[in-house]
Image (cartoon, rainbow, N blue to C red):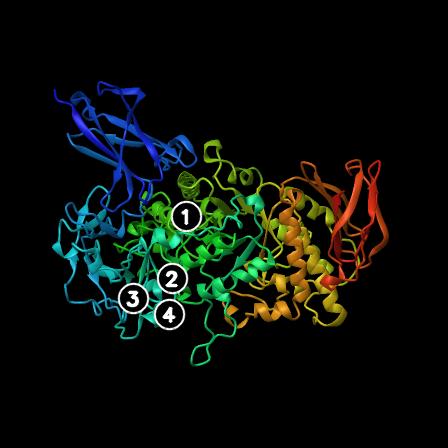
Amino acid sequence: MAPLSVNITYHVGLVGQIFRNARLVGSWDSSGMYSDTWTEVPMAEGRSESGGQVFRATVQLSEGQRGWRFRWGVLLDTPGGANRWGIATEVNDRNSTYRHREFTLTAPGQVEEYHLTHCRRLGANKHLVQGQNDPGIRFAVWAPNAQAVEMVRGDIASGYIADDGYGATSSPGGFPMVKDAASGIWWIDPTMSQGLARFSDFDHTPYMFRITRDDGTVAFRTDLCSRCQIGSGRFDPKGGHYTGSRQDLDGSVSCSVVIDPERVMAVFDEPFPQTQWLDADEFWRGEFDPLRPVPARMEDLVIYEMHVGGLGAGRTDASGNPLPGTLGDAIGMLDYLVDLGVNAVELLPMAEFEGWATWGYGTSHFSTVEFSGGGRDHYKYFVRECHRRGIAVIQDVVYNHYIREAERAEWMYDAGTPEKNIYYWYEGRSEHYARADGGYIDNMSTGFAPRYWEEMVRKLFISSAAALVREFHVDGLRVDQTTSIHGYAVLHANGAPADDARIFGQKFLRELTRTLKLIRPSVMLMAEDHSEGDFRTRITLSPDNGGLGFDSVWYAAFYHHLVGDADNRGPSDARLLKTAGMGDSGPLAMNYFAGALAYAGNHSVVYHESHDEAGNSGGTHRTIVVAVDRAALVGETRRYAEARSRLVAGLSLLSPGTPMFFMGEEAAFQNDYSYNGFLNQRQDFAAERNGNGRNMFRFYQDLIKNCRRSVAARSPNIDVLHVHNDNRVIIFHRFHGTEHLLVFASFNNTPFSNGYRVSAERVPDARWREVFNSDSSYYGGNNVGNGTRDIYAEWGGINVVIPANGFIVLRNA
């Protein structure tokens, strides 16, 4: 009997030679029979029709094995090392974490594929045509329930197609697509239509998919894998006729746009559609300055959290309405940040979101960059300019829900019933609930949970992340509210725990981190996670050791102990700044904070202010406002406010965690910053830095410089030596190698002018010298400190002057 050939392809889905030396391994032996001892064969490297890296191999299996189930995988040499397992996806079994692919042997010429990402599989992509120099174009969309799908072009002026087709161009008409029954993907390429022979004919063309859903109704849907949404305004026509401009149209409901990802606009301010281009390689040339290396380790970062929409204070339209900031404004801030001394910027979400002026925590299209902020090419300019200045870029991403109004995006994409709402998790059948929405999953986000058990849904998120890392050169991701993905899922009908949704949420997060680390091992991955107990330690363990694979975790408890102005906190939080700001001199729970401080060295990102607590969450305000319980910031009250603000910033920056703070803290911004009011709450960075915030800016500059230069300050090592609630004092030791720091911090309203003596066995006997004083007159303080004299620690005892509401840093001499 003739053997049956099986053609196996491993699709990377990204351009360039990322992996090498791929080997196919599978559960067969050299004679083509099933075997529990897997056989290894080399794979040939090549390019797919879309230009992505692929590896191919053909194996011959015995005719007598027809109907048998075989398993396979791929070994790769990756940027992180040799012989790495290339299958990031776990099997679709809640009880298994195995990672392999399976097939049943059926017929000769059988084709099996694995896609690490879908960056070149779905959406509008180049299609290489044999014998033709110029590529054609391929459109593909996942719509497994659809009866028919066609791609239709839209009008470039309005950028919108109504529910009845108004706005679709009549020439050359629609392109009917064909379905691959196994995957549920509808597609069309130049081999099926000569009209698709030239990609250049479609470059910057608006389009949508006309989908005949399972019930026969017709719906116009955007391409969820699009690289650009044409709208940059806030108007939603709600399916009606629209004759306005694309500039006024909400991007989440507008047409998708064909984009060539291998080109970047040559002129930053050239309006859409652009005509002058640079090849991507040419654009990125000169991205790095060897004299300003970009940090690649979490422990080396000082993170500046930035909301692009919150920049550009004072800018208005012709009618005087405030306009949100743009990536151009963000680029304009970079020299300011270099002067400040931070070496990482974390951007609030920049993927396409509803409206035009929000925080971005409701995403509709994950592979786009919000057009109202400047769009994808402006984002690349921003990253390049950051890297030229030695600044790493961290991007906040949201994979726990979609936008609320997702009618033209994820919601009921190709069907009309909850059970077939393909991007959303739904339990059971709708007739089993009193209300049809009862089977959806709530997860403490602002929308129903995604369908994490569906590989196509997971790849939607993972592919967008891979593009950020590979195409946009982003250095790290902060994944929003991962607890909602793996821990908070409950049934909408009754709040019962949704265990399967939680388990598959964990599977998704492991697949995400595995994929990104395969592509770029140095990528820095942060989880906003509020898990407690043993599970929290698993977040930063590798997936192979039972973890989720993140490098660090946002440590919200640190904030609630240190500042603690949020209404939703309990009695177990120290709330140091909140309590001190009320003005009395009673005891503070320094011991509670000491526990959080000590724990911060466990792969934590710590902060004394983030976007959530700068006036958005109930009870919260800017740090300087909390420091004096909202009293008027004038005279001595302001001096108290600034001293306490310096103190909490210092405790964060000198902690063993990776420090972060929200924009404006360095210039003592005082306006609340809320998600629905920020346009009218913005402040001018230059004016505040040179005005009321000048002393604070100097303080941040000097402390950041000292921290970045100190290996002890950057290390995770800490020993809390002394805590005294009545005195409101904490003393801790930071150390690495031969460098040692002692930090003496006090929330006491009276200085310890004659010294604060502490005796502790763990105080290193040494000669010490003051290297930083938060009370320096250069920062607006009273100059209470130890000057330049040597301070000696002997037999575990040391006596150090500590200013009121301030801190001292000593270094071993």
Residue bearing the label numbered 4: 233
- Give the CA distance from mark 3 to mark 4: 17 Å
Identify which residue is drawn at 48% across, 51% down.
Answer: 480
Dot 3 surroundings within 10 Å: few (below 14), some, or many (20 or more)?
few
Is label 3 in a helix, a strand or a loop? loop
Q: Is residue 451 left or right of residue 205?
A: right
Of 161 and 31, which appears nearest the observer?
31
Q: From the viewer's perspective, is the residue at label 4 or at label 1 nearer?
A: 1
Image location of residue 244, percent across then percent down = 30, 75
- Give the CA distance from mark 3 to mark 2: 12 Å
- Residue 102's place in the image compared with 360, above or below, is above
Q: Is residue 251 left or right of residue 330?
A: left
User: Label for residue 375?
Assistant: 2
- Residue 521's place in the image compared with 346, above or below, is above
Q: Quadrant of the C terminus?
A: top right
Of mark 4 and mark 1, the one earlier in the sequence is 4
Residue bearing the label numbered 3: 273
Dot 1 surroundings within 10 Å: few (below 14), some, or many (20 or more)?
many
Dot 4 surroundings within 10 Å: few (below 14), some, or many (20 or more)?
many
- Give the CA distance from mark 2 to mark 1: 17 Å
